Amino acid sequence: MRHPRGKTWGKHIVKILMLRKKYLLDKNELVYKEYRLSFKQKLARFTLILVASIVLAGAYGLVFKHFFGSPKEKKLQSSLDEIRYRYQLLENDFDAIEHELWSMAAAEDNVYRPIFDMEKIPPSFRQPAYGGTKKYEELEGFENSDIIISARKRVDELLRKTYIQSRSFDDIIPLASDWNNKLSHIPFIRPVNVNIPLGDGLKFREIHPVLGSPRWHHGQDFLAPAGTDVFATGAGVVARAGWSPFGFGNMVEIDHGYGFITIYGHLKTVEVTEGQSVKRGDRIGLSGSTGISSGPHLHYEIHYNGKVQNPLHFFDDDLTMEEYNEMITALNGTYGN
């Protein structure tokens, strides 16, 4: 039994098939005949469609490129954006390096050069000189010439400032090394422990305690019990060691260089020899009462360029006994005896 709608479906199929074909009315026979294109007509139609498709595709490509850019252009733009970003990071590094150079120059002009009595470098000398307008001519005309030239200028500027700073340090380093050596030689500490009280200092004695006649006392006395350790107050070379013809009894004289000489008098024993090198904190003998002395003590003198100095100006008397002992131990640990 056929489906009641079977005829309807059949009619639709016929119509669809008829729509896919073209028919023309034959006026002579008064009937519709199927119209078929010749091979040339089909070829011409295909060519027209192909050309139209190419034109539409080209137009679409131009519109897409105008609004969105080609993949190659997008890639190039992305690379350019990355270059600009990296250059910004490089600029930050340039700024940090320049700040460090500025800090070093400021420290040099305000600290190091004044200490070593050196003239400051003129600010104009620290400024970069680019060597003419044609120096960066070969970098012009590129897509990113502004970035390249700017970076090159910053590099040249930093190289010049670094070179100037390096040459300046070349001048300072030998002076600093000599200054450090000088600091180790200048008599900067007490020759005995700080718990030992002071005796007579630099003054004119109207009556000498032993001789009874007026004369100058050119040093500082420390009322040290016999056998107290006596230390070199700075590095140097022993110029004299032994009995003194000047009333100091057993004595040690150290030439520290840089114009400084120290004398340690009335020693019980001398533990160094003439020509021996000593360092600050080295034990050179034991205190006593030899020579022209009224009792156990250490007589200590400092001479600078032939003039007597007040020893009290050359050491810190605020140290405790423990701090002094720690200092001597550290000096001996560093230099050795």
Image: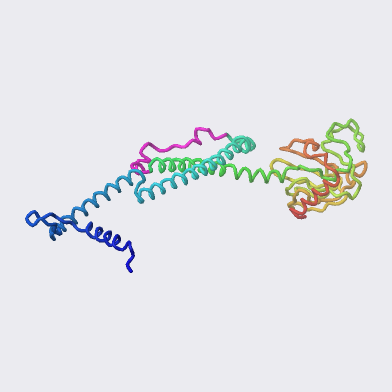
Residue at image point 67% right, 45% down: 180
Residue 73 on the magenta span? no
Q: Residue 147 occupies which quadrant of the picture?
A: top left
Observer-nearest residue: 30 or 156?
A: 30
Q: How far across and down, in percent of the image, does residue 173 sit?
A: 60, 45
Looking at the image, residue 46 lies above or below residue 235:
below
The residue at the far front in this view is 1
Q: How far across and down, in percent of the image, does residue 177 sit?
A: 64, 46
Observer-nearest residue: 131 or 146?
A: 146
| Image quarter in which the N terminus is found | bottom left
| Image quarter in which the C terminus is found | bottom right
Q: How far across and down, in percent of the image, does residue 309 sit?
A: 77, 36
The residue at the far bottom in this view is 1
Residue 38 is left or right of residue 221, and the answer is left
Residue at image point 35% right, 46% down: 69
Residue at image point 33% right, 43% down: 66
Observer-nearest residue: 55 or 10?
A: 10
Residue at image point 91% right, 37% down: 211
Q: How far across and down, in percent of the image, does residue 156 sit?
A: 45, 42
The region drawn magenta spans 120-143
Residue 271 is left or right of residue 51, and the answer is right
Residue 142 on the magenta span? yes
